[in-house]
Amino acid sequence: MRIDKMLANIGYGSRKEVKQLLKSGAVKVDDVVVKDAKQHVDTAKQTVTLNGEVVEYKEFIYLMMNKPQGVLSATEDNSCETVIDLLEMEDQVYEPFPVGRLDKDTEGLLLITNDGQLAHRLLSPKKHVPKTYFAVIDREVTEADVAAFSRGVTLDDGYETKPGDLKILKSGVRSDIELTITEGKFHQVKRMFEAVGKSVVYLQRISMGPLPLDETLELGEYRELTDEEVELLRNYQVK
């Protein structure tokens, strides 16, 4: 990779600004000053420093966020705060995007990455990657609802959903449930409950594929995935 492209990609300025850095003699590769913007560097084998500080380069970034309510699962919006706005600038420079979306009023696990291939694998309808939600429902959820969800329900537009795994955690005037689905239709969880005459008053995604929400993350907080978690996602196969 060209040294100017590498430095620009990780936020050290535009190509023009990076060329000025190089001309100043501030950049070294393996302790040798590099001024030629066209020089190639092997980021896996060579050490790049800027003013004596090691420059860490990575092609992809993988983040887990505990998305709060009121924030859009989008890269940009003219009127509302987005999940990208919650990222530090050092992470924004990688131009990541949310993997799928959570409704504005939905909380919980959201993956953010710039790895388009992994995002496609997790979102492809053909892969049937399960997503599990915790929800509070405004009425009593019954075993009849469990049976209906296990068959699939008909949404307001006539779409017949794939089977969902509904578990009743607490039943009453307000019921706590967990629901695992393998689709991502618009407002799907809410619309599935509307199909059985109930409504969702609180919704949180707690897992996606093999990855559970890190419960130590406060709302709006995020962290990088570990190497093990990334490999888990890359190698995940739905049983």
Image (cartoon, grey):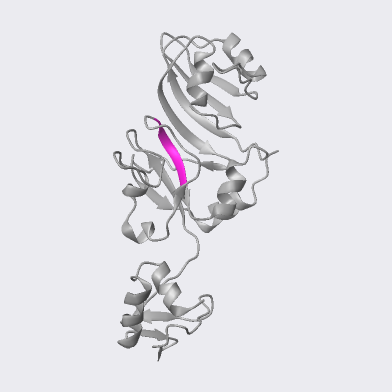
Return the x and y of residue 232 as percentages of the image width and height: 59, 50
Quadrant for the C terminus in the image? top right
Return the x and y of residue 210 as percentages of the image width and height: 58, 42
Does residue 89 appear to the left or right of 177 in the view shown? left
Q: Residue at x 55, y 53 (%)?
A: 116
Residue range in magenta is: 106-111
Q: Is residue 109 magenta?
A: yes
Does residue 212 appear to the left or right of 237 in the view shown? left
Q: Is residue 84 above or below residue 13?
A: above
Return the x and y of residue 186 as percentages of the image width and height: 50, 28
- Residue most extreme to the bottom: 32
Return the x and y of residue 227 as percentages of the image width and height: 53, 58
The answer to whether residue 19 shows anywhere in this view is yes
Name the main secondary structure of what is drawn in magenta: strand
Q: Residue at x 65, y 51 (%)?
A: 235
Q: How many marks?
A: 0
Q: Residue at x 60, y 24 (%)?
A: 165
The answer to whether residue 52 shows anywhere in this view is no
Does residue 61 appear to the left or right of 90 in the view shown? right
Q: Is residue 20 magenta?
A: no
Q: Is residue 110 above or below residue 151?
A: below
Q: Residue at x 51, y 16 (%)?
A: 193
Q: Quadrant of residue 24?
A: bottom left
Q: Is residue 235 above or below residue 174?
A: below
- Residue most extreme to the right: 239
Q: Quadrant of residue 219?
A: top left
In front of the other: 157 or 67: 157
